Amino acid sequence: MPRVLVSDKLSTTAVQIFKDRGVEVDYLPDLGKDKEKLLAVIGQYDGLAIRSATKVTEKLIAAATNLKVIGRAGIGVDNVDIPAASRRGIIVMNTPFGNSITTAEHAIALMFAVARQIPEASASTHAGKWEKNRFMGVEITGKTLGVIGCGNIGSIVATRGVGLKMHVVAFDPFLSESRAAELGVEKVELDELFARADFITLHTPLTDKTRNIINADAIAKMKKGVRIINCARGGLVVEADLIAGLKSGKVAGAGIDVFEVEPAEQNELFGMDNVVCTPHLGASTSEAQENVALQVAEQMADYLVKGAVSNAINMPSITAEEAPRLKPFVKLAEVLGAFVGQVTEDPIKEVEILFDGATATMNTRALISAALAGLIRPQVSDVNMVSAPIMAKERGVILSEIRRDKSGVFDGYIKLTVKTEKQTRAIAGTCFSDLKPRFIQIKGINMDAEVGRHMLYTTNGDVPGIIGLLGGILGKHKVNIANFQLGRDHPGGNAIAMLYLDERIPDAVLEELRAQPSIDSAKPLQFDVAEA
Ligand SMILES: NC(=O)c1ccc[n+]([C@@H]2O[C@H](COP(=O)([O-])OP(=O)(O)OC[C@H]3O[C@@H](n4cnc5c(N)ncnc54)[C@H](O)[C@@H]3O)[C@@H](O)[C@H]2O)c1
Ligand SMILES: O=C(O)[C@H](O)COP(=O)(O)O
């Protein structure tokens, strides 16, 4: 039974879902904050469910020898070293929509709080001061709201802004004009947004491009009296520059939920006039926490139990419905890759994957990942569908995909062509109704070879007696042949043989085969398939 650790505070709905779906679960919500203890136990788990408190570092991933999936109950995965997880073949998934409305509402709440200085007015009233003249606010109606990042949360904030009778301008390089029109917002460049907005709200992920997007230069371009809301990520705003802007009066107020350093227990922003701070509460409503806990547990259990993948950052999705249909073709793609990976010794330059007929309508991203995993595995044994595309990219492999309608006798097949500096190799395969992978073409030569755990691949002259020669030598050494396939390009031309053996061929037998004048090469192959 797969075993999951929940190392941050999550609704207990998640625990129940794991149990109901046949996953053993340890709910230790404070463990994420204790790096050493987490490091000591992580090796026992197949899955790790987290929020933002657990930092999944390269060191933790190195110790997580059984880990298969990291599930983030929430959106931001900047607390997970995704390249390190991918290299180790660990899927990282999040719940991209579960807390969007809640977070958008928090941004709007902060905007109102800053516009009317509600926290300070409340504290003063609680203190019995009745400072009616101290708190003069601004109206929101008719003001310009600048939304930076108009994805899930930004677009909800934008439509709420429109509903509040604000004029909304948005900067997002991926926002189309038609989507902007649908939302009722004006798409603008960043400098224009800075120049026009009375309120600026941030809703981008933290990336190299967005880090420090609100700095002294940006603030210099803003209107005097601008109010800034950050409910996205600390690091988007340079806190020292914001503080300077607040002190100079250029910035009239700020609503900050996320900080450069979290937990933020000391910060110069604390205590400043008209700075409303919350401790990363954007996603903290009972509704959002139920949503993300339920979703992360379902996704992780589906993966661990059924092999279904959804909302993964580093792997194509595979639905629970398509998983059974896709599975034999994933295996086919993997064995095609494994064939080329085992016969190729030079660095791979280019990989082309052709999907013909029925295979072209399948989840080809998953099939490509499987083919790459098979291709790389002879060199890197622990590669899988998550890490293979990254490894291929790191090695500079140029990847191309072709999909086409049924073009031959097969309902569908996959052809893998791999180029190295020295040569190009191609192999095609399919699955018949028994759902077992078969090689149907190697080097342009047609055949129908069942794929076995142990195989022997020879290139030889098209001369009489080859079957007898191979069978005789193997028989003499008591190596049993389960299946024997021959093919040639033309009579007397290039020929190949694919033999499915009951066991791995001993080295001495191989040498004897290689010494035969009519055998050009003999290569033992292994495939990770069930025994017939
Ligand atoms: N405070 C919280 O508790 C809380 C809760 C949930 C999410 N978040 C954070 O909110 C942010 C937004 O989440 P989301 O779900 O809307 O993400 P999303 O991926 O749906 O949207 C992000 C948008 O930012 C845009 N973007 C990317 N680079 C940009 C750039 N350089 N300039 C402008 N726009 C850019 C993208 O095109 C995308 O549309 C994330 O950082 C997430 O971690 C915070
Ligand atoms: O990215 C998110 O989903 C938010 O930052 C929420 O983080 P939390 O789950 O730690 O509250």
Image (cartoon, grey):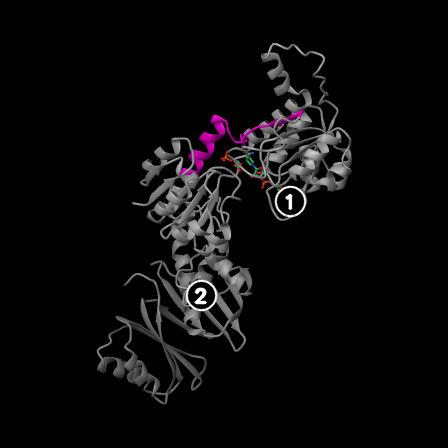
Front-most of 400 and 414? Answer: 400
**Residue count near mark 2 (Cα–Cα under 10 Å), binned few <14, some 14–19, many ≥20:** many
Q: Position of residue 147 (x, y in %)?
A: 68, 35
Front-most of 217 and 326? Answer: 217
**Residue count near mark 1 (Cα–Cα under 10 Å), binned few <14, some 14–19, many ≥20:** some
Residue 286 highlighted magenta (yes or no): yes
Q: Position of residue 281 (x, y in %)?
A: 53, 30
Q: Quickly name the residue at label 1.
A: 210
| Helix, strand or loop for disc 2 | helix
Q: Position of residue 528 (x, y in %)?
A: 34, 63
Quadrant hosting ligand 1:
top right
On residue 375, the disc is 2
Q: Picture quarter containing residue 103?
A: top right
Of circles 1 and 2, the one toward us is 1
Where the N terminus falls, by quadrant? top left
Residue in the image at 38% along x and 31% along y:
12
Residue in the image at 38% along x and 65% along y:
438
Query: In the image, which residues are magenta?
Result: 273-297
In the displayed orientation, state which residue is furthest to the bottom: 517
Residue 119 highlighted magenta (yes or no): no
Image position of 48 (left or right of 118): left
Reply above or below: 508 against 32.
below
| Helix, strand or loop for disc 1 | loop
Q: Quick check: is the Cβ at mark 1 less than 8 Å away from ligand 1?
A: yes
Reply above or below: 51 against 326.
above
Q: Amino acid at mark 1?
A: Thr
Front-most of 469 and 420? Answer: 420
Reply above or below: 29 against 444.
above
Q: Amino acid at mark 2?
A: Leu
Image position of 63 (left or right of 76): left
Q: Is residue 468 visible?
A: yes
Q: Position of residue 331 (x, y in %)?
A: 39, 59
